[in-house]
Amino acid sequence: MNISFADISLAKPGALAVLVTEGASPRGAAADLDGKTGGALKRAMKAAGFSGKAGSVLEVIGTRGVAAGRILLVGLGKSADLSAAGMEKAGGELIGRIEKTKETSLSIVLDGISAAKLPAGEAAARIAFGARLRAYRFDKYKTKKKTDESKAGLKSLTVMTRAAASARKDYATLSKIADGMFLTRELVNEPPNVLFPGEFAKRARALSKLGVKVEVLGEAQMKKLGMGALLGVGHGSQHESHLVVMRWTGGKAGEKPVAFVGKGVCFDTGGISLKPPAGMEDMKGDMGGAACVTGLMHALAARKAKVNAVGVIGLVENMPDGKAQRPGDIVTSMSGQTIEIINTDAEGRLVLADALWYTQNRFKPKFMVDLATLTGAIMVALGKEYAGLFSNNDKLSKQLSEAGEAESEKVWRMPMGAAYDKQIDSQFADMKNTGGRDGGSITAAQFLERFVNKTTWAHLDIAGTAMASPKTAINQSWGSGWGVRLLNRLVADHYEA
Ligand code: BES
Ligand code: MN
Ligand code: ZN
């Protein structure tokens, strides 16, 4: 879908959408359009009882006086409540509507709407952003029937506004964030026979064309570094494990970087502690944390963020096999701490243990944020609406909570402490990899904290938000791309020069 911004012209054929606020009668271009149609729009609004409530759409088809065969009146809600998120939602909902038709081009008229906190250019850009996020499809493996939506195929979207120049400027940035989110969605959606650790590493390597420095470590190098925790998880797999380091240096030379670390379990069978069959296919998304880090690095580099940022992802496959690790095994992590394996299905924390230690040890970052589809228990606690936030730092937690509210990618801080930490003490090693049923997401976070070495750190448990989360106006994809917007905003608001 080609997206562009233009000045207002009511002569365009195809479908025409007009945005109206609640209770107000059509103004500006919307009033002009009503005039051209001989008052058909106002009559239709009255007849249908359409008042411009947020999320409401009224279709008016085949009116005289205009080239457009279909006019959609889109309600934005009360003008005092207009927000960036509301505009994105309107753009998304409009695409959902139009994709059910045979229309191939859509022009959206944004005029006569004033919002105190939302400049006209940004409003237009946000509509386009929402439309683009909604239009994402993953149907590359459907050879016969493409989804109804992509069959219809909207080819062009024009947002018409008197502020086209500033809309273009705002959208240029948003569009790069969307590219990052799409990379994340794509990686999560890919099947596990295609996206094994080596293939994921190859796709991360492609970020070098944006100026990201990418290093890919294999098993021999990780063995030299002493990464026994990460390597143990991959023992049963036919695929080599990898650690990928991505560095974007858009900030001042020598300035400490911010760091993002991702769990990249390309498929999680549970290993010898095998998972039950129902729903196991979803475990292709167990690399959602790594996918988010990769999409974020894409977004930061594409928009040339003035920040030094590193992304580190641990890529493994957790399989049952004659060579697989067993419950009872004791592995030695890069930190030197030993871990007794109680359950081979608690593998994500083992991967992160070495990835976190490596990251703080090599980069001495300002902070580390890790993302992981770590525990089923986080969905028991928070559902799919919030990701779990665990941290050793109040300031970073506050920044993440605020960024989450602003980007509609919300996080909820969970408690941590010594009493929980005790649950993972082991009778044979320095710690064990599970802490029992109670507080399962918290004891997982306590485990991770033992590998951050006092670095300012936050852990986001995204098991509920990275995949199979509820469909929204701006996301219809199984892999949601969650986290890219959140962390991009964290960087933009607090860590860019
Ligand atoms: N990848 C899973 C967590 C998960 C479950 C993510 C469902 C998304 C949806 C993780 O590796 C896992 O298996 N965790 C176990 C931990 C337990 C063995 C302590 C869990 O949550 O049951
Ligand atoms: Mn597991
Ligand atoms: Zn897992």
Image (cartoon, helix red, strand yellow):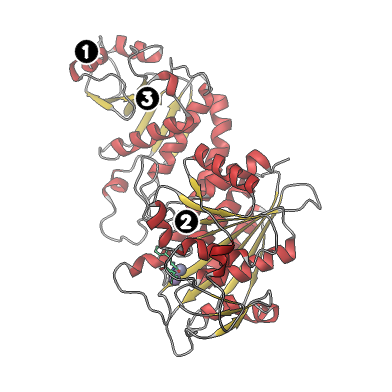
Residue at position x 43%, y 14% from top? 112
Q: Nearer the viewer, mark 3 or mark 2?
A: 2
* Image quadrant where residue 88 sits: top left
Are discs 2 and 1 less than 8 Å apart at CB? no
| Image coordinates for residue 432, horizontal then vertical, percent | 54, 76
Q: Is residue 182 above or below residue 27?
A: below
Are discs 3 and 2 less than 8 Å apart at CB? no
Return the residue at label 3: 76
Q: Nearer the viewer, mark 1 or mark 3?
A: 3
Mark 2, Cα crowd under 10 Å, few <14 / some 14-19 / many 20+, is many
Three-letter residue code for mark 2: Ile
Return the residue at label 1: 43
Three-letter residue code for mark 3: Leu
| Image coordinates for residue 259, horizontal then vertical, percent | 66, 56
Q: Is residue 14 above or below residue 26?
A: below
Return the residue at label 2: 462
Q: Secondary structure at mark 3?
A: loop
Q: Quadrant of ligand 2?
A: bottom left
